[in-house]
Image (cartoon, helix red, strand yellow):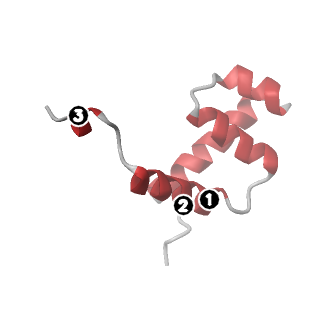
Amino acid sequence: LPESADRGPGPEFDVEVRDLLETHTRGMTEAERAVIHLSLLGTPVADIAEATELSSRTVIRIRVRFAKQLTGEDGADAG
């Protein structure tokens, strides 16, 4: 295989992901954005809760709401 086949997605993908995250985290509080960031890094819920001083239940709610936004299940685009 060519060496380039071993690499992950290119810089265009990184820009798309960054734009997607910026769009979907707009209007969130700093703590909510931290929850999403730490979640994307694979940080366990308990650790996110401790770092953000939120309850584990709140961390989970933020993550679920964000996932629904990404999949269009939040109803924001309906109408």
Query: Which one is nearer the viewer's eye here, 19 or 60?
Result: 19
Q: Residues within 10 Å of mark 1 (few under 14, many from 20)?
A: few
Q: Dividing the picture into quarters, in which one does residue 37 lie?
A: top right
Q: Which residue is disc 2 drawn over? A: 19
Q: Looking at the image, is 64 positioned above or below residue 70?
A: above
Q: Identity of the amino acid at label 3?
A: Glu
* As drawn, 76 above or below 45: below
Crowding near the residue tagged with mark 2, few <14, some 14–19, many ≥20 C-alpha atoms within 10 Å: few
Q: Position of residue 51 (x, y in %)?
A: 80, 27
The residue under label 3 is 3
Mark 3 or mark 2: name the one nearer the start of the chain: 3
Residues packed near mark 3 inside 10 Å, few (<14), some (14 to 19) or many (20 plus): few
User: x, y (%) of residue 17?
Assistant: 49, 53
- Mark nearer the viewer, 3 or 2: 3
Where residue 67 sits in the image (x, y, percent)? 53, 47
* Left or right, 55 with reference to 43: right
Asked if labels 1 and 2 touch by Cβ distance under 8 angstroms, the answer is yes
74 left or right of 47 in image: left
Residue at left 66%, top 33%? 38
Q: Is residue 52 left or right of residue 23?
A: right
Query: Is 72 rendered above or below residue 37?
Result: below
How far apart are the alpha carbons under marks 2 and 1?
5 Å
Give the distance between the C-alpha atoms of the residues marked 1 and 3, in whole angstroms.
32 Å
Q: Residue furthest bottom?
A: 79
Q: To which residue does mark 1 refer? A: 22
